[in-house]
Image: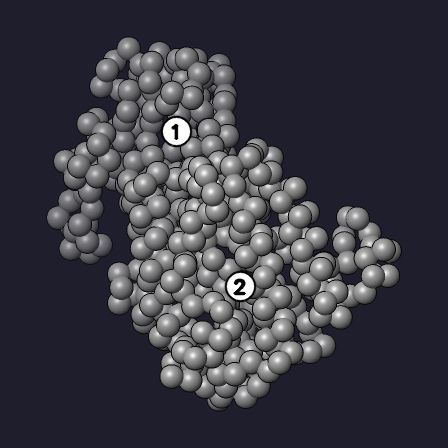
Amino acid sequence: MAKMKPKSIAFFNSNDIYPVSADSTLPFEQHRDIFYLSGVDQEESILLLFPDCPNEDLKEVLFVRETNAHIAVWEGEKLTKKAATKNSGIKTIYWLQDLDKVLFEMSTYADTFYINTNEHYRSSVETETREDRFIKKILAKYPAHSVAKSNPILQKLRSVKDTIELDLMQHACNITEKGFRRILSFIKPGVWEYEIEAELLHEFVRNRSKGFAYTPIIASGNNANVLHYIENNKQCKDGDLILFDIAAEYANYKSDLSRTVPVNGRFTDRQKAVYNAVNHVKKEATKMLIPGTLWKEYHIEVGKIMTSELLKLDLIDKVDVQNEDPSWPAYKKYFMHGTSHHIGLDTHDYGLLHEPMQANMVFTVEPGIYIPNEGFGIRLEDDVVIQQEGEPFNLMQNIPIEAEEIEDLMNN
């Protein structure tokens, strides 16, 4: 609210419950912005913020779906007005049916509407969202009001985590650790990728996670060279590696882990050499995540380290480097994705990449080397918190990563 223009109202909507077919729906997932600002995790909720409102009762207003005994029987208990206040700290609660009347009064005091559009750099949305429909409605009904954007404010706020958020993310990482340790003793030649997925889901849910933070990748053999492989339906063969990109959520906060392990419990010499190269790049890249670092420059420096490792592995040679296209360097043949992204309420969380990194931002670190003609790919990833001074704090420091430790645990 302190970042808003004078005499302005900001609007935030819950997500829709999305239909599948007939009367089927996807599980509800709350829009992260209204959850971040209010703690309300229920459909058909709307938050209005109006710091300059002359009516003190309308500075913060939350609208929720009116509940009754019938809804409680068929869908479960919904927020009462009292419960909504307890969850959010917002005193003024209305039923959703009162929105038009209350908004009309508030609009007469305001000059500007803050609308909440999706401006994330990875967004690609074809579905019209509940937020989109709301924006259309208010701009048509109140054409004389100026329009401002909430997203730039939220990008700055949400990218820097407070201690409560960091504790929740640490808990998500701890659950992920339990899942990973569980599958190390489960994996053997002949196991199927989906069986491993089932073991992970069991461990996550039994620790009070809703499940995977994102669609899990369990990629054995050459499947690892498909960066977003999610079929998870192949049998794991003796001598192959399995690349995991799997992690738990907790209280809507995400973790993001990548590990690569040998199906038979032992890396070959070649596999271990590539593995240790990726691990070295990860360690060196992590050291660069300090306040003031620019994301774009960081990735250039990581590319130089990766280039050095690929030369040692004879995957590229000096001529490849000398003749490389600066817009697609030689190392990109084997490491084609970015090294780090913000993480928080979203796996690819809010954060303005053109601005310097700050303390208490949380980033992944996830280099990889992918070699289709050798039948394997390796990615290693942890989640780290930028510190005011010194190296980042690794939220996944207790999750095994060294090749020898992986082998010892798998053969214990």
Residue drawn at 68 percent across, 53 percent down: 303
In the rendered structure, the answer to whether residue 318 lies left or right of residue 294 reads right
In this rendering, is residue 232 above or below 65?
A: below
In the rendered structure, the answer to whether residue 402 lies left or right of residue 84 reads right
Look at the image and tell me in which quarter the N terminus lies: top left
Look at the image and tell me in which quarter the C terminus lies: bottom left
Discs 1/2, front: 2
The residue that mark 2 highlights is 380
The residue that mark 1 highlights is 11
Mark 2 crowd level (few <14, some 14–19, many ≥20, 10 Å Cα): many
In the rendered structure, the answer to whether residue 355 lies left or right of residue 313 reads left
In this rendering, is residue 359 above or below 363?
A: above
| Residue 246 seen in the figure | yes
Residue drawn at 64 percent across, 56 percent down: 337
Residue type, mark 1 in image: Phe
Residue type, mark 2 in image: Leu
The spot of residue 208 in percent (x, y) is 26, 61
Q: Quadrant of residue 113?
A: top left
In the rendered structure, the answer to whether residue 139 lies left or right of residue 31 reads right
